[in-house]
Image: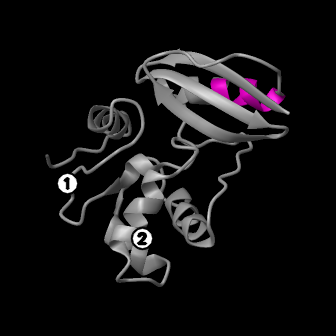
């Protein structure tokens, strides 16, 4: 059974969905999502995300599961290795997963990340270091804010 909770953050409403022990979806929206059911992981995630937004946390320990294709999983696993305050390009990720010609496909996988923030897809930039698309919150302004929080300056 799914449990959901929502809370306010500097980038809008954070809506969390849990399936038992794992967060399976994080969305950033203008309006609050539903609150129903209960799961310890919802409280853990909210606490840790709030600490992150306050600059007091650099990595997350709550349980999450990103469901997707094998290719998406490989991209998300690589993104998960990018530490707080660092960035990679789509091309870097394509090379790291052994598919150097797949930068655009990597971009598609990045955009379909079901658990942004937990898997820091905001840390992926264009090849020239320019900030590119972001599907969370208000898009590029949200990505810029998250990168700034982590001390990353971007080329616009």
Q: Is residue 109 visible?
A: yes
Q: Distance from label 2 to label 1 (Cα)?
A: 15 Å
Q: Which mark is residue 111?
A: none
Determine whether 97 is above or below 55 in the image: below
The label on residue 93 is 2
Residue 83, how many percent across, how many down?
Answer: 48, 54
Query: Which residue lies under the disc numbered 1?
Result: 130
Instruction: Give how far across and how far down residue 155 sits, in percent.
Output: 15, 49
Nearer the N terminus, badge 2 or badge 1?
A: 2
Please determine whether, in this image, residue 78 is positioned above or below residue 24: below
Identify the residue shown where x is 46% and y is 77%: 96
Quadrant the N terminus occupies: top right
> Which residue is drawn at the image coordinates 48% and 48% (left, top)?
120
Magenta residues?
40-46
Q: How many marks?
A: 2
- For this orientation, the residue located farthest to the left is 156
Q: Position of residue 76 (x, y in %)?
A: 55, 60
Q: Circle 1: is it few (<14), some (14-19), or many (20+) Cα within 10 Å?
A: some
**As rendered, which of 86 and 89 lies closer to the eye?**
89
Per the image, label 1 sits on a secondary structure element best described as loop
Q: Nearer the viewer, residue 52 or 4?
A: 4
């Amino acid at each position: 059974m799914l449990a959901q909770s929502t809370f306010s953050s500097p980038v809008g409403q954070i809506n969390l969905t849990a399936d038992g022990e794992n967060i399976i979806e994080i969305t950033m929206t203008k309006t609050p999502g539903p609150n129903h059911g209960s799961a310890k992981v919802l409280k853990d995630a909210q606490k840790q995300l709030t600490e992150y937004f306050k600059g007091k946390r650099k990595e997350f320990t709550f349980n999450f599961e990103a469901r997707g294709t094998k290719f998406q999983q490989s991209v998300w696993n690589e993104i998960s290795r990018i530490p707080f305050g660092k960035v990679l390009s789509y091309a870097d990720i394509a090379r790291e997963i052994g598919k150097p010609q797949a930068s655009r496909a990597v971009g598609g996988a990045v955009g379909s990340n079901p658990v942004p923030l937990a898997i820091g897809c905001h840390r992926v930039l264009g090849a020239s270091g320019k900030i590119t698309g972001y599907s969370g919150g208000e898009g590029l302004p949200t990505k810029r804010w998250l990168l700034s929080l982590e001390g990353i300056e971007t080329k616009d």
